[in-house]
Amino acid sequence: MDLTCSARGCQNAAVWSLLWNNPKIHTPERRKTWLACDEHRESLGDFLKARGFLRDVEPVGDSAADR
């Protein structure tokens, strides 16, 4: 299965997993995943950071969500 970037309209292959949660609605251990290509890693990460949601960034295949 090919994984694609979560940025709107992007069809590039995902190479990064942005692990996040919204502490107002998710338990602390819960992680949701956005996928990112190299081009969108920073912009997607900045969006999540600005809201206090970003927990970690890992290469695709390294996170538990990718297994």
Image: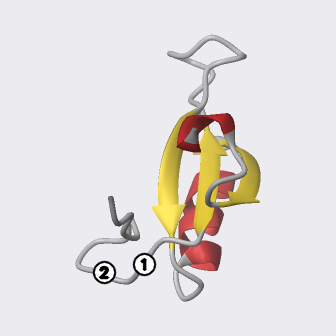
* Residue 62 position in % (x across, y down): 72, 51
x 74%, y 57%: residue: 58
Tell me: residue 63, above or below residue 15. above
Quadrant occupied by the C terminus = top right
| Residue occupied by mark 1 | 13
State whether residue 36 appears in this view: yes
In the image, is 29 to the left or to the right of 48? Answer: right
In the image, is 11 to the left or to the right of 12? Answer: left
Kind of residue sitting beneath label 1: Ala
Counting labels gives 2
x 48%, y 53%: residue: 34
Kind of residue sitting beneath label 2: Cys
x 49%, y 60%: residue: 35
Q: Secondary structure at mark 1?
A: loop
x 54%, y 67%: residue: 44
Quarter of the image where one finds residue 60: bottom right
State whether residue 51 appears in this view: no
Tell me: residue 16, above or below residue 33. below
Q: Secondary structure at mark 2?
A: loop
